[in-house]
Image (cartoon, helix red, strand yellow):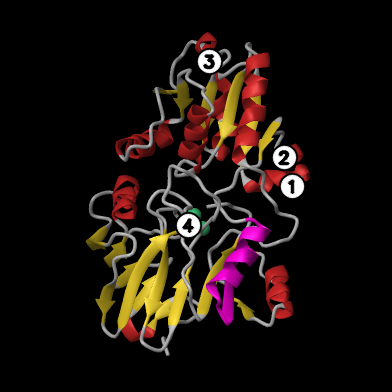
Amino acid sequence: MISIDNKLYIKDIDTYIDPFFPVERAIITHGHADHARAGHKHVLCTPATSEIMKIRYGEKCANTFQTIEYGHPVKIGKIKVTLFPAAHILGSAQVLLETSKQRVVVTGDYKTTTDRHLDPFEIVPCDLLITEATFGLPIFKFNNPEIEIGRLLDNISKNKENTFLIGAYSLGKAQRIIWLLREAGFSDDIFVHGSMDKLCDFYNNKGIKLGTLRKATIENKRDFKGKVVVAPPSALKDRWSRRFENITRCYASGWMQVKQRAKQSQIEIPLVISDHSDWNELTNTIIQTGAEKVWITHGREDALQYWCKTKGIKAEPLSLQHRDETSEL
Ligand SMILES: [Zn+2]
Ligand SMILES: [Zn+2]
């Protein structure tokens, strides 16, 4: 049996998955800060994740990187490790740990909906599934993102005096929103916050066409009339946003399905667009992997644990430290 504990430490190969503290050997599922940290000795991940880590933390953020493509196994000791697409952000991976006797899958963050700028999510059959559950409540059921973008574009066309400030995480969500706008035919220049321009360049260089992007640093407020500005959610409230007039605040997040939350944050256009799975995606994935046992991390465990029980699947919550359950990374 593969020995893996609640810190996602695999004893047999002295390796952690997404450790929050510097370790000798780490497998990193994706570049978000609550999964990828600087300071590990040896990191195994996809090529895109290693590039993202270097952009965010510097070239020397790990002593060595070993990158493997999706579906190409590598043998570490007695365990075969393979990464599969998680369709969460560019480079995001599920981790399959495999021996002749057992298959363990750690999903990392994932979504299963088709999203043409990312490799599609793959179901990886396994005995033990360690799944995220950020939106693990039956109330979470996400619309097609095109519907949400359509609503935004409709608003933009009717309010030419306003500046549409969209809160979206700098890595993954911001680029997805811009990509969705382009797919919907929006060809105007889009302004981006300084914290995301390198990551937008990275996506562009990977062939994900984001169109003309400009830094939102221009002094003349009139330049932003009728324009779209994409910024991290924290920037919506701070001094940075004072450079704009007639702001319409928008926020792209699965949490926007909770109306109260949109209201509290004074969001006029909540965009229910998530890079995580909703309830149906989580439960369908559990069924399709055929897992006999499920460990639930990263969010709402109770409802999913109960659901598993009703299906005769053993399930346990796995509390990982340092995870903010209200965030969506
Ligand atoms: Zn996460
Ligand atoms: Zn993430």
Q: CA distance from mark 2 to mark 1?
A: 7 Å
Image spot of residue 106 (x, y percent):
47, 70
| Residues rendered magenta in the picture | 278-298
Give the residue at mark 3: 224
Give the residue at mark 1: 258
Give the residue at mark 4: 121
Question: Seen in the image, is 106 located left or right of residue 204?
Answer: right
Dot label at residue 262 = 2
Marked residue nearer the N-terminal end (4 or 2): 4
Q: CA distance from mark 1 to mark 4?
A: 26 Å
Asked if marks 1 and 4 touch (Cβ < 8 Å), the reply is no
Q: Which element carries disc 2, helix, strand or loop?
A: helix
Q: Of residues 39 and 298, which is closer to you in this image?
A: 298
Asked if marks 1 and 3 touch (Cβ < 8 Å), the reply is no
Give the image quarter of residue 25: bottom left
Indicate whether 260 appears above or below 329: above
Marked residue nearer the N-terminal end (1 or 4): 4
Residue depth check, mark 1 versus mark 4: number of the one nearer the observer: 4
Q: Which element carries disc 1, helix, strand or loop?
A: loop
Kind of residue at disc 1: Val
Q: CA distance from mark 1 to mark 3?
A: 29 Å
Give the image quarter of residue 101: bottom left
Marked residue nearer the N-terminal end (3 or 2): 3
